[in-house]
Image: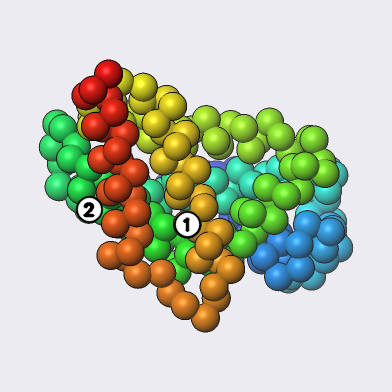
């Protein structure tokens, strides 16, 4: 059985996660300027002391909220990937299905988190202390997509990963700007398949 110390650590980690999730909710509703220790404590239903215990500054709170969201986003991507057929090579059609499901998951299943993500993207331009955390997440996403590009036979997997990631983000922003409409999987898949097939064809020609 876990020791008393283990129980305290578990409770502490749970409380820390609750504070970060409260910060993400505030980001989505009101933007980064609303994220203060006092406001986050109120949103999380905890004490101001608890938020300052885990996060010494507002910048640290925003940075850790970004890292927390990034981790949950990667977990959703992994869950979608695990549900698709496993194979040694990756046809563009199957990769397009994976990417379309990723956009739907981000926009529909975690729209609040996605709004918070893009609020943080804008905040990076105003607050350079967030740049390193965002760059680390960007690198992680590009590494995952580069592996898929290699499985499709890409001759430039890193470049193609950046192109695909830019497409994904563009479609997410488009969906966020149309809150009255849910994106259609078939439309998303068609866009991704066209991009992927063009990249694969270019690799074969090269």
Q: Position of residue 110 (x, y in %)?
A: 50, 64
Q: Quarter-wise, where is residue 155 in the image?
A: top left
Indicate whether 26 appears above or below 179.
above
Residue drawn at (71%, 34%), measured in percent from left and top?
131
Residue drawn at (79%, 35%), measured in percent from left and top?
129
Q: Indicate left or right for 69 with 41 as reference.
A: left
Q: In the rendered image, is residue 93 in sight?
A: yes
Q: Considering depth in this image, is 112 or 169 the residue closer to the camera?
A: 169
Residue drawn at (63%, 38%), measured in percent from left and top?
134
Is the image coloured rainbow, by chain, by secondary structure, or in one colour? Answer: rainbow
Which residue is at the far front?
A: 205
Q: Position of residue 154 (x, y in %)?
A: 28, 26
Q: Indicate left or right for 143 with 185 as reference.
A: right
Give yes or no for contact between labels 2 and 1 (Cβ–Cβ under 8 Å). Answer: no
Q: In which quarter of the image is the C terminus?
A: top left
Query: In terms of secondary structure, where does tag 2 sit?
Result: helix
Residue 171 has which mark? 1
Instruction: Tell me the residue that label 2 is attached to.
Output: 83
Indicate whether 47 appears above or below 81.
below
Query: In terms of secondary structure, where does tag 1 sit?
Result: helix
Q: How far apart are marks 2 and 1 (CA)?
A: 22 Å
Q: Indicate left or right for 52 with 122 as reference.
A: right
Q: Quarter-wise, where is residue 186 in the image?
A: bottom left
Q: In the rendered image, is residue 72 in sight?
A: no
């Amino acid at each position: 059985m876990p020791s008393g110390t283990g129980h305290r650590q578990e409770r502490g980690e749970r409380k820390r996660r609750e504070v970060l999730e409260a910060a993400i909710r505030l980001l989505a509703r009101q933007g980064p300027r609303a994220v203060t220790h006092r406001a986050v404590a109120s949103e999380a239903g905890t004490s101001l002391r608890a938020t300052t215990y885990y996060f010494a500054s507002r910048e640290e709170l925003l940075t850790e909220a970004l890292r927390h969201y990034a981790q949950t986003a990667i977990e959703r991507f992994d869950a979608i990937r695990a549900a698709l057929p496993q194979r040694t090579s990756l046809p563009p059609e199957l990769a397009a299905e994976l990417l379309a499901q990723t956009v739907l998951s981000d926009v529909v299943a975690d729209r609040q988190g996605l709004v918070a993500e893009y609020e943080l993207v804008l905040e990076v331009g105003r607050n350079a202390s967030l740049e390193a955390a965002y760059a680390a997440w960007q690198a992680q996403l590009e590494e995952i997509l580069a592996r898929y590009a290699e499985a499709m036979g890409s001759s430039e997997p890193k470049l193609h990963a950046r192109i695909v990631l830019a497409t994904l983000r563009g479609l997410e922003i488009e969906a966020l700007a149309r809150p009255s409409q849910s994106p259609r999987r078939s439309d998303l898949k068609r866009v991704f398949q066209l991009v992927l097939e063009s990249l694969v064809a270019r690799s074969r020609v090269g």
